[in-house]
Image (spheres, rainbow, N blue to C red):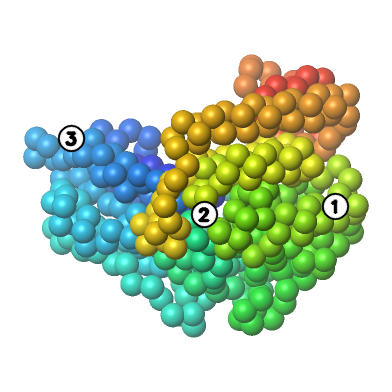
Amino acid sequence: MSNKLLYIETFGCQMNVNDSERIVSLLADIGYESTTNPAVADMLLLNTCSVRGGAEEKVYNRLANLRIYKRDGKKQIIAVGGCVAQQEGEELLRRLPYVDLVVGTHNLHLLQEMVQAAELGERRSETAFIDKEQRLDLFPSIKGESRLSRFVTVMQGCDNFCSYCIVPYVRGREISRRSADILHEVRQLADDGVREVILLGQNVNSYGLKGESDVSFAKLIRQVAQIDNIERIRFTTSHPKDMSDELIDCFADVSKLSGQIHLPAQSGSDYVLGQMGRGYTRHSYLDKIAKLRSVRPEIAITGDIIVGFPGESDADFEETLSLMEAVCYIDLFSFVYSPRPGTKAASLSDDVSREAKKNRLDRLMALQRQHTGEICSRLVGSVMPVLVEGEGKLPGQVSGKADNGRIVNFAGDVSLIGSFVDVKIVKAYPNSFLGER
């Protein structure tokens, strides 16, 4: 039985959540089991994200807080993974002598060896990017606790180099896994009781476009849909420029494909989109939204918006609000622009005042709250299939996700966990629904 405990904190995106699951699985093989209490852990690991401004200092500050657990002669290993680890590398070891290991985004396959060395007192940083041929075979599998929904990585990296984005620099260039390997993993998950898979990548719908894979992303979705016991398919995150008609057609005739898509616009202004290097226009974005709604009228659309990008005028921001009115997102992730060192936009003059950024964000969020409330209110009285994943918020309730991605709580026995249940929506809340069978 294991006598070593792992405490892990995950920052940022779903890619990091997936990486954390792989870390837990990898370290279980060398005797670690998870704990939620850092005070008793033998190893403390931060799996970091560097997309937002100030990410590096937040990580340094959090590591300083964790240092307390190494005092009084304790021998906890402190480790840093993810994008900040990739970005900072040896600098983390130099600045913080109590940090034992730094593992970059392409180096999880080395983690067992690094931890075993750290147990013997060795400090080490591994942040080398791996060439394409090797990377295809370096996806640590996830073992352990069976779950109903699982992430499946189909591609890594990004070749878009949007002017504000650090991802290509810390995750590397795009590479797609072989479809046979992906399908083999999904079949194993289905055999283990998984009912929903979420196909994952930094730019997931560019899967196969660089020629590494034998099929397009749309064809991959159709192949996954043929696997017995997989009953729902999701994917994230999509880039609008790669939302092909072939992929849109999947929403028309692949019944297992979820009726929700995350399609970040980032801005509604053609000028700002050009400065961001997004590779599409306002018109082409809205054209893809119209096509999606033509094949699946009830589709729920979520997105990302950045306000206060360098050069964004009041008129540019008004175009973003009008884009929101045209799309009507069910949910929206909104951010104030912050420069990321090393990106193209970092050289631009950050000429939008802090006050203007705050006012724009407040207006945008108020409009989104209105849209979310209106959309969800219209869904009251409708019936949705819900994949029951666990107990609900209140005693006697169970909970799961509807086809549009929203959480639904309703009265039911735990014996329903793992099944799809038709649920009538009786009340809408800001982040969930109340339903009844």
At numbered mark 3, what does the secondary structure look like: helix, strand or loop?
A: helix
In-front residue for pair 52/8: 52
* First in sequence: mark 2 vs mark 3: 2
Foreground residue among 64 and 161: 161
Q: Which mark is residue 347?
A: none
* Residue 419 x %, y %: 76, 40
Looking at the rendered structure, the secondary structure element under dot 2 is helix
Residue indicated by mark 1: 290
According to the picture, the residue beneath numbered tag 3 turns out to be: 68
Q: Nearer the viewer, residue 345 or 92?
A: 345
Question: Which residue is identified by label 2?
Answer: 15
Disc 3 marks a residue whose amino acid type is Ile
As helix, strand or loop, the secondary structure at mark 1 comes to helix
The one nearer the camera, 7 or 306, is 306
Q: Position of residue 155 (x, y in %)?
A: 58, 67
Image point (43%, 56%), residue name: 348
User: Relative to 56, is 127 above or below?
Assistant: below
The answer to whether 6 is drawn above or below residue 367 in the figure is: below
Amino acid type at circle 1 is Ala
Residue depicted at 67% across the width and 39% down the height: 318
Could one spot residue 388 in this view of the protein?
Answer: no
Which amino acid type corresponds to the residue marked 2 in the rendered image?
Answer: Met
